[in-house]
Structure formats: structure tokens, C-alpha cells
Amino acid sequence: MTPPRLGIGVIGAGRVGAVLGAALRAEGHAITGAYAVSDASRERAAELLPEVPLLDVPALVERSEMLLLAVPDDQLASLAAGIAATGMVPGGQLVVHTSGRYGIEVLAPLAEAGSATLALHPAMTFTGTRADLARLIGCPMGITAAPELLPVAAALVVELGGEPAVIAEGDRPLYHAGLAHVANHLVVLVDQARETLSRLGIEDPGAYLRPLLEAALDESLRHGAKALTGPVVRGDAGTVEAHLQALGDLDATGTPGERGDVSDTYRVLALAALSRARLPQSARDTIRALLEDDMPTADRVPREGRMLREDEE
């Protein structure tokens, strides 16, 4: 099912909204206008949506057959309620939001006013530049809609170059948590590793880490927890202890008055690795004791945490 050519108003010319607006424009849709407040958003709109007027929300609602709501999660409900309260929403207008957290219930006031509502979330990190347009090709996109509107949501995804995946309304928080956990916390881990190597005088820590990270990512995507390597899963308690000492020293020599966070992160994630390792109980207890030493009780992983069974694939 191919959607008709639409006049689309982009509410939120941030990294996501401006890029998706540009992608839809390239498919022949008309961008009626964009709402952009910050200097960065205005510059982004000028770059990705040239000659598109910057308008306020009421003007966009009045001019557009489809509204693309690309705003922070915590602003979405109030935005939808505010638009509905104006009484300007025509029956049949399409309203699409890009939040991973929400399905279509957050747009209920607009649905009650006669709009057709969709949730469309690309599972990728946006830079807000033209480089993102190519990255949309083949990108998985989680869609949520009423059954009769799922073909419309899927068609929009296909137009963007993506691969649609239906996510149930009640599953959206868990879906988004999984994506945010891996993407955001991977950035933290890489930044901490870069900091560690930089302290040792390695001039290009990113280049040094790339082969290791690419291999680890590929193996973990293929084999899950079976891809784990290192001292925790080998039961090398002495190496774990040496790591904790070295990282503790690193954290203590950071910015004056501020303790670093690398050793704390190592402890928490090493405990998660331990829960997935096939180790004798004695080795498990020894490593757990090292990792939980001086750790706040709230951060400790329960001793009966997840363990792989011998017969798991």
C-alpha cells in the first residue's frame, strides 16, 4: 500500500524530525513547514529542509494533512493534548510520532478529535545530518497503530527505506528500554575505554579499540552470552582484582574533587557477566566477593541471578 502524496508538517526539527522530513520530501511529499525553536534546530532545518518555512504549531496543524511529531518523550502527551484542545484538527488528518517509548495511546486526544494516529520509531541513533539519510536504508522501525492503519504505517516505513516491525502498545516501554540500554550505555563504555587508553598515552584510542569492538559486537549478535570472554568468565580472580585496583587508581586521579566512574561501571557489568558465566560455585563466589567489595547494596546483583543452563543453545 503506497500512501498518497501528503502535505507534512514537522513539529520538532531536531535530529530525528529534520532527517525524516527530508527523507519523506525526497519521496515526493510536500513539507508544509517546520517548527524549530533552538538555533541548532533552525540551522538543521535550513540544511535538511531548505526553503521550508518555519511556522508555529497552529499554522502547521492548519496547513498539513500529516503531522510528524518528533519531540522529546516527556513533551509528547502535552503536545498532543494541546493540539487537540485547539479544535483545529480536521477529521482524517494523519498524526505520526517518532517516540520509541510510546505507542498510540499517548495520541488519544487527537484520535478522539478524528485523527488517524501512528507510532513510528527508527531503531538507530541520529546525527541530524545528511549522513543519516543513507543509514535509514534497511533500518528496522517499530510501528504501532490500530489494525486497519498498520498498512499505512508499514508503507511510510518502506518509503523511508526501512523495515517495519509491529510492536504491541504494551510492549513499547520494554522495546525502547532494550534499545536505549544498548545504544546509550555502549557510548558510555566506549568513552570510558577511550579515557583509559588516553591516560596511557595512546594517541588514537578509537582506532585502537575498533577491531576489538567490531569483533565483540559481531560475535555477541551471533552467539549472545556465549561470546563472552575475559577474566570473569574464565574465573581469573587475580586478574579481576588487578583490574579493580588499576581502575580505582584511574578514577582517583581524575578531575580534582570529582571521582571517576569507570571502576563502578566495571563492577556492575562484571557482575552481570558473572551471572551468565558457567563457573564452579567456589570460583563464582570468589569473584562476586571481589566485585561487591565496597559496592553499595542497591547496586549488587542477586546471588540467584541468571545462569546459562548446560543445555541452552
Image: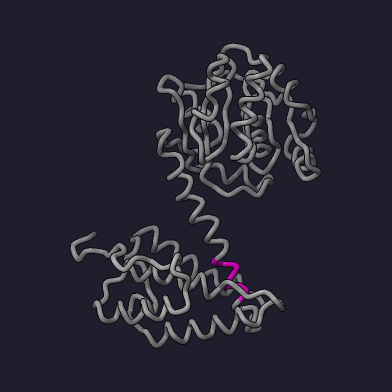
Q: Is residue 83 left or right of residue 40?
A: left
Q: Main secondary structure of the magenta part?
A: helix
Q: Is residue 125 visible?
A: yes
> Does 194 appear in magenta?
yes
- Up the image or down, 45 lies above or below 192; here it is above
The x and y percentages for residue 119 are: 51, 31
Q: Is residue 159 left or right of residue 200?
A: left
Q: Is residue 166 visible?
A: no
Q: Is residue 201 left or right of residue 143?
A: right
The x and y percentages for residue 129 are: 69, 46
Q: Coloring scheme of the render?
A: one colour
- Up the image or down, 285 lies above or below 186; here it is below
Residue depicted at 40% across the width and 22% down the height: 147
Q: Nearer the viewer, residue 133 or 253?
A: 253
> Does 68 appear in magenta?
no
- In magenta, the rendered stretch is 189-195
Residue depicted at 53% across the width and 16% down the height: 112
Residue depicted at 57% across the width and 46% down the height: 135
Of all residues, the one furthest to the top in this rendering is 91
Total marks drawn? 0
Question: Residue 167 lies in what quarter of the image?
Answer: top left
Q: Nearer the viewer, residue 224 or 50?
A: 224
Of all residues, the one furthest to the front in this rendering is 297
